[in-house]
Image (cartoon, rainbow, N blue to C red):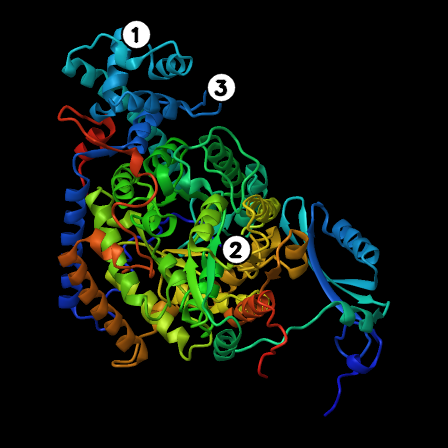
Amino acid sequence: MEAKSWGANGVEPHETGCGSSKLALDPGVVAACRDAAAEIAAGVSAEIADKTTVSVERTVLRLLGLEKADASDVPLANVVVGHVFDQGKLGLGIGYWIGNGMIQTGLEPNELALEVAAGELDLCALPIAEDEAIHDCVANACAERQRQVSAALEQRRERREQIGESPPPHRYVLTATGNIYEDVVHARAVADHGGDIVAVIRSTAQSLLDYVPDGPTTEGFGGTFATQANFRIMREALDEWADSNGRYVRVSSFCSGLCMPEIAVLGALEGFDNMVNDALYGILYRDINMVRTLIDQRLSRMINGFFHVVINTGEDNYLRTADAIEAAPSVVASQFINFQLARDSGVRPEHVAIGNAFEIHPDVPNSLLLELAQAQLTRELFPDSPVKYMPPTRHMNGNPLRTHACDTLFNLVAVGTRQGLQTIGVPTEGIFTPHIHDRTLALENVAYVGTAARDFADDIEFKGGGIVQSRAQYVLDRARAMLEGIAEAGLLEAISEGCFGDVRRNPDEGRGSEGIIATDGRYFNPLVEIMSDAPVA
Amino acid sequence: MHQSPSQEMGGIKPYADHRDDGIVQVSFTLPVHGEQTARFAGLEIARRMGLSRPEVVHHEKVTDGYTYLLLYGVFEEPLDYDAVRRESFEDEYMSKDEVDAFVERTARRQIVVIGASTGSDTHSVGIDAMLNLKGYDGRHGLEGYKAFATHNMGSQVPNTALVARAQELNADAIVVSQTVTQQDLHIHNLTELVEMVEAEGMRESTILVCGGPRISDGLAKELGYDAGFSKGTFPNHLATFLARAIASQAGDSSEDAPE
């Protein structure tokens, strides 16, 4: 297969998927959905104003280069933020205290952190400089680091263009051994068989840790810890692979859980191309406090948007906890909301990979047509965004050959509706985390279908009033009704009523709420200033 | 009716094309460079597994230094099926309506069941399939039964929280789901729970069951549970077990399920 350069987002250049609608969608209904989503997103902005979180503050320190941990393995970013938080002074922002510390001691941020960790420095007990001097000092330090990161990423993107990639759909493959060095072996096998994006799944408990662990890790459960050192190891391995094989391979992780914005910065620092970054996932599936997540997702997505990292939303998950046929409208409603929240954080449309999944029970008659309808619908509603299309998992029963057959149909729908990113389905789904050769078999299936049906999407239309068109129109109309209802009630209220994935959460419950801080009138965040000053596309 | 041959004969072998041909399929990856070397190593591994006449039907490179193999071989030694059959036992399960009727007749009250996916395990699929009204594959979970008062705590529930809630509710049964099994994480979690329940002095009065794709009844009993449920379990299987366990606790075990 020839490797050539494609758009930064996995969408073919000058190709927005489908041109005119194959589903005869009513533009008025689509516009009503967008309007309602904009109203919902505005409500979120009001909800999170004048608040920050411990993870947002740690993110500033991560950009400033704090990487290591103290003697008891507490990351330095946590040591410093905790030190100010415990004194009740985080309302001014960690930037304020670091800026002042730099002025008063002449030390760099990392040196300050080491002194704090050693118990030799109290950042809040130093003499205080003028507000403006403090602001400029830390803002300049952040801006300098940001310019370095931007330059490195720019260089990387040039290299990506130069080396070239496979045409979309980009094959997105997960590894999950628990040991980063084994993940590298699996990732090379993925690349050898045509995988375009390697994502290392995180250890099952990581989303609830209010810190990002330090150093390379070799023990995880159902996945491998996301750490800066692990990011570096995987990135280097796949850069090396790209150099010897002449095809660029993207790397992805997860900006989710209690450390959404921190992971975004670590990804940018280590040259990641892609991040799973859903606005609501942590609330629904990890029982993280709503307000905490909504504040964290905002900065997290600002960072990814600023550095042009493609983000993936997670609507596929609703289809795993709720029935795929009944839940289809909630998926579309969430896609509109997630997209709008990402846009409000400055992410460009071509960098939002909207989530969708092939999860209808295989015994349902015409399930293939219903899946085509949903996949084509997502594609047409977000013509400038690549869709992240997920394989069947929920009804995969442990028979690898049946799963392989279902994956074949999934692969056909992916290529037949021109999805931008395609997570590959693995025959041993539902049995264990994939063995190394399982992904080989899966990628061979994707390659076969991709070749056999290469121009299928350009050649098919759907019959007026047929099953596919009617289903898509019905789902869109139900999504509109749902969005208008949510716009009226507010997003927080809608979540507490169980609108998404049949999961209910209350605004005053959930994990991590102790890490929300009301900001002082003099609060500033140097990172947010840089990101919000950037021209929004 | 025609009786299957295995039921009348003592010795059995795997069946592929015809009776007693003993043919089995195995597949694995070897961390070996050369594909030919890998083939020979694969054949030797198959022989050591007790397979005769092994044959590699497919092999391919997974990545540098790793080769995937698919083999067939023959399992020669017949298995004494009667001996195996005596050890295992296949339960006769009641339907949802039968369970409800059975509990009404025996326990004469609702059975309080509390469930969770415990520890760091984020998977709620298993516990939801067993407990939630929606259930699995068109069969209602325990919430849909009159016989049970069901409390599903969801996923990532610490063992301590589960035990505390069980005490609060005076639960008759605790149902635990474990999906992630890498490096035996599930064993650690399940062992911890048993120890906690014992330390609280609740073990005698509480039915303790676990389930998950890699959990067997044997493993569960070894860890100190009353039963373990694996793949292929439907909510009515769990319901039947709980109903019978409560009935036997109450000394009503003589009354049998309607067939």
Q: Is circle 3 on the same chain as circle 2?
A: no
Give the residue furthest to the bottom: B1
Q: Nearer the viewer, mark 1 or mark 3?
A: 3
On screen, residue A321 above or below A26: above
What residue do we see at 15% from left, 48% from top? A43
Q: Earlier in the sequence, mark 1 or mark 3?
A: 3
What residue do we see at 58% from left, 75% from top? B93
Q: Amino acid at mark 1?
A: Gly
The numbered disc on residue A62 is: none
Question: Which chain hosts label 3?
Answer: A
Q: Nearer the viewer, residue A38 or A493?
A: A493
Report x, y in % for residue B175. 52, 58
Q: Is residue A309 visible?
A: yes
**How many other residues sit within 10 Å of disc 2, few (<14), some (14-19) or many (≥20)?**
many
Q: Is circle 2 on the same chain as circle 1?
A: no
Labels 2 and 1 touching (C-beta < 8 A): no
Give the residue furthest to the right: B77
Labels 1 and 3 touching (C-beta < 8 A): no
Residue corresponding to mark 3: A71
On screen, residue B11 above or below A262: below
Give the secondary structure at mark 1.
Answer: loop
Report x, y in % for residue A408. 49, 67
Report x, y in % for residue A390. 41, 59
Q: Amino acid at mark 3?
A: Ala
On screen, residue B43 above or below B81: above
